[in-house]
Structure formats: C-alpha cells, structure tokens
Image: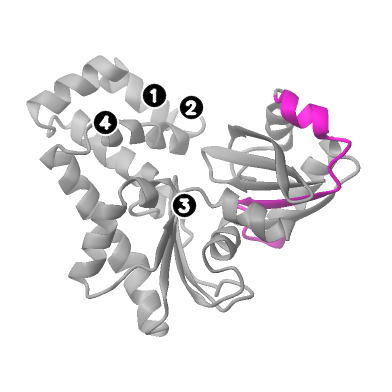
Amino acid sequence: MIAVVYSGSKTAFWKIARDGKTIAECTMPGINPCFNDQKAILQFLNKKSTLINHAESIKKIYVFAAGASSVERRNELAETLGLFFKFSKITVKDDLYGAAISACYNNSGIVGILGSGANCAYFDGKSPEKNNFGLGFILGDEGSATYLGKTLVKSFLQEKLPKDLQSEFEVKYNLDRPQILERVYKKPMAQQFFSSFFDFFVEHRNHKYILDLIDNAFESYFKTYLLPTIELHPGKEIHFVGLVAGTFQDQLRAIAAKHGLTITSITKEPIYNLLNYYSN
C-alpha cells in the first residue's frame, strides 16, 4: 500500500492506493515545513481518521510539499511524518518536482505552478532546474491565489473596488480594516488568510474588475517566471499545474496567446497524475 501527498501551503491532498487502485483519500491543512512545525503537522494528522486507520498498512509515502526545497526541510518533514507512519518509507520532494512529474512524467518541458503559491522551472525529465523564483508570498508568488487575495484585500482597504464588489466583500467576510490588519500582521498564517479569498474570484469571475485583476496577475507571472524560463529553454512544451491555472485556464491561455505561446496542458489537481505515476 502506498500514499501520495501533494501539498501547497493551504491544502494537502492525500491519496492511498493498493495495487494501483485508490482505496482512501482525504485533505488536510498544508504541511509546508517553513510554516508548520512538527507539533502542528502531527495535530493535523491525528485529526484524520482516514490516515489513522491506514497508518500501519502504508509502506511507501511520496510527499511533494511547498517549502520542502532544501535538504534540511525535506528531512525535517520526513522525520515528522515518520513519527506518525512508523512502518513507512517516506520520500519528500518539493511541490515543483511533484508538479513536473504530474505534467511531464519522464519527458522534458517547462512547468509552471499557479496554486496557492507560484513557481516555474524547466524539467529535463529527471529534475527541475534550479531557479531564484521561490521567494514566498511576501516577495513573490505573482499570479497565485495568495497574490490575488492580497490584491483584492488591498483594493478593498483602499476602497478602490467597484461599489457592488465593495459591498459584497463586506457582507461576505464581515471584516473591517483593524481586523484585517491584525489578521495579517499579528496572527500566523497570513498566506492562508490571503489565499482564502480565492472563492471571491470564482464567484465573480465574470465581473470586468475581477477579470482585469486576474489578467494583470497572469501578466505579472509571465514576465516574472515564464518568459525568462522560455528564454533559456526556447521551443519546449509549456505545462501548468494548480488550482488557479485550472480554474482560470481560458484567461491563462489567452495571456499566453498574447505572447505568441501555446500551453500544452493544464492540470488542476496534480495528485491524480502523481498517484498514477507512482502506482505503475
């Protein structure tokens, strides 16, 4: 029995399989080792009956997590998970590696992540090329759910949203300026707070103001991540992975077309392809 885990900073997706067939699955808060310590991760695990019931039967676990980009962080997360899954061999890679495998399998290509966070890299069929993009939600993550959330919240606080959206935001979230600033600057997990507003974009996806915010975010992503990668690796197929890319794929493809580019594939939930890859 194996388990495959794909975790952004907001949500971790788990699938458990035997002989290539899924027998159980669940979601839990993200297990980013940069943001979640051992105690928090173990608390998340101990709240999931699905994982408790299968913990002793799982022999291999393949984990792809945001924030697991260094050997130290990967070992730290593997050690934590090993306290819960005592009979499992645990392999930890970062989410970019998981996205690359999900999109390309063993083929080469350029892989972009647009989920709760953002990244991009050339994948040679074995490993993603190192880059300087992974700056996190404060310094980077352009185009991600977190970036979109920050843009929306800032516009709300500055009263730059159209009146209808300003009113709907107030009603939906019941947040005022002091509450938002306290949540961002005094409480933990500001990244998850910002990404939680992604639903607002989905609900108002046909509103011109929201469409413009998304287009501008994608343009920023292309200029920051994708175009520099293409410049180093011209002619390679382009793949995207993640909730934002999958939800707004028509706009993403339109922005690509403006730059004379074609996107080969967009995978909203990479966990399915990862499970297939490691089950066969």
Position in image of residue 143 (x %, y %): 33, 53
Q: Mark 3 points at which residue?
A: 136
Say which element carries label 2.
loop
Q: Do the residues labelled 4 and 2 touch (CB within 8 Å)?
A: no
Q: Mark 4 points at which residue?
A: 203
Residue type for callout 1: Glu
Question: Who's the residue at 56% across and 60% down the image?
Answer: 102
Question: Who's the residue at 37% across and 67% down the image?
Answer: 225
Numbered badge on residue 187: 2
Position in image of residue 120 (x %, y %): 45, 65
* Residue 162, placed above or below residue 71: above
Q: Are marks 4 and 1 in contact (CB under 8 Å)?
A: no
Nearest to N terminus: mark 4 or mark 2: 2
**In whole angstroms, how far apart are the C-alphas of marks 4 and 2?**
27 Å
**In whole angstroms, how far apart are the C-alphas of marks 3 and 1?**
20 Å
Which is in the foreground here, disc 4 or disc 2? Answer: 4
Question: Who's the residue at 81% across and 27% down the image?
Answer: 53
* Residue 157, placed above or below residue 126: above
Nearest to N terminus: mark 3 or mark 1: 3
Q: What stretch is highlighted in magenta?
A: 48-71
Q: Is residue 49 magenta?
A: yes
Nearest to N terminus: mark 1 or mark 2: 1
